[in-house]
């Protein structure tokens, strides 16, 4: 499956090869696909599953646009991690569990950003929730790419031990 995805990406990369490195293209393609999936799931959750209604839990009530973000997250988190680990940043030599923990932390920060931006765009700016989700996604994706490349899936430089002098 990995090789099939890479072959497809390689085919579509040719026209973009002068504009960006293959890794950036892979990130945009995989992240874009996962983002479209996330937005689609948000739309379905918000409009058809939740019917734009508040979600009443025993100790709190969640607005439908925030509940829809969480519902979409349940699917987009594992697909995003797997695409990033095996397709985009496959050269990372960090252990898988370290990557997963870092990815989870990054996604936690991104969820917080999603929450803040969605609240801002929907409740203060009065944007339609799907438009607010798209704007929020653009802001969060920029932050996410930089953080994933430099932190979550970075390539750990192996430092060779200096040779000890022989006596």
Image: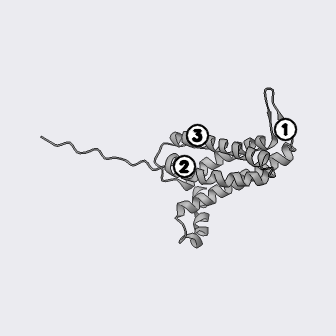
In terms of secondary structure, where does tag 2 sit?
Answer: helix
Residue ID at (53%, 43%): 99
Q: Quadrant of the N terminus?
A: bottom right
Q: Residue furthest top?
A: 59
Label drawn at residue 114: none
Residue 81: percent from left, percent from top: 60, 47
| Mark-to-mark CA distance, 1 and 3 | 28 Å
Between residue 137 and residue 99, name the one nearer to us: 137
Label drawn at residue 54: 1
Q: Earlier in the sequence, mark 3 or mark 2?
A: 3
- Image quadrant assignment for residue 67: top right
Residue tagged by mark 3?
A: 105
Residue 99 to residue 26: above or below: above
In terms of secondary structure, where does tag 3 sit?
Answer: helix
| Mark-to-mark CA distance, 2 and 1 | 33 Å
Between residue 166 and residue 18, name the one nearer to us: 18
Near mark 1 (Cα within 10 A), the count class, few <14, some 14-19 or many ≥20, is some
Residue tagged by mark 2?
A: 147
Q: Is residue 32 left or right of residue 48?
A: left
In terms of secondary structure, where does tag 1 sit?
Answer: loop
């Amino acid at each position: 499956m990995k090789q099939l995805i890479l072959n497809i990406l390689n085919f579509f990369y040719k026209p973009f090869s002068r504009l960006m490195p293959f890794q950036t293209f892979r990130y945009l393609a995989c992240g874009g696909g996962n983002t479209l999936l996330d937005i689609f799931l948000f739309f379905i959750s918000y409009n058809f599953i939740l019917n734009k209604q508040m979600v009443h839990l025993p100790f709190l009530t969640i607005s439908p646009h925030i509940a829809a973000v969480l519902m979409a997250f349940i699917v987009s988190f594992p697909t995003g991690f797997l695409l990033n680990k095996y397709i985009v940043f496959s050269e990372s030599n960090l252990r898988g569990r370290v990557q997963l923990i870092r990815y989870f932390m990054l996604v936690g920060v991104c969820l917080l950003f999603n929450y803040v931006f969605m609240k801002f765009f929907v409740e203060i700016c009065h944007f339609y929730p799907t438009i607010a989700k798209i704007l929020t996604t653009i802001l969060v994706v920029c932050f996410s790419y930089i953080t994933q490349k430099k932190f979550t899936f970075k390539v750990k430089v192996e430092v060779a031990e200096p040779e000890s002098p022989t006596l």
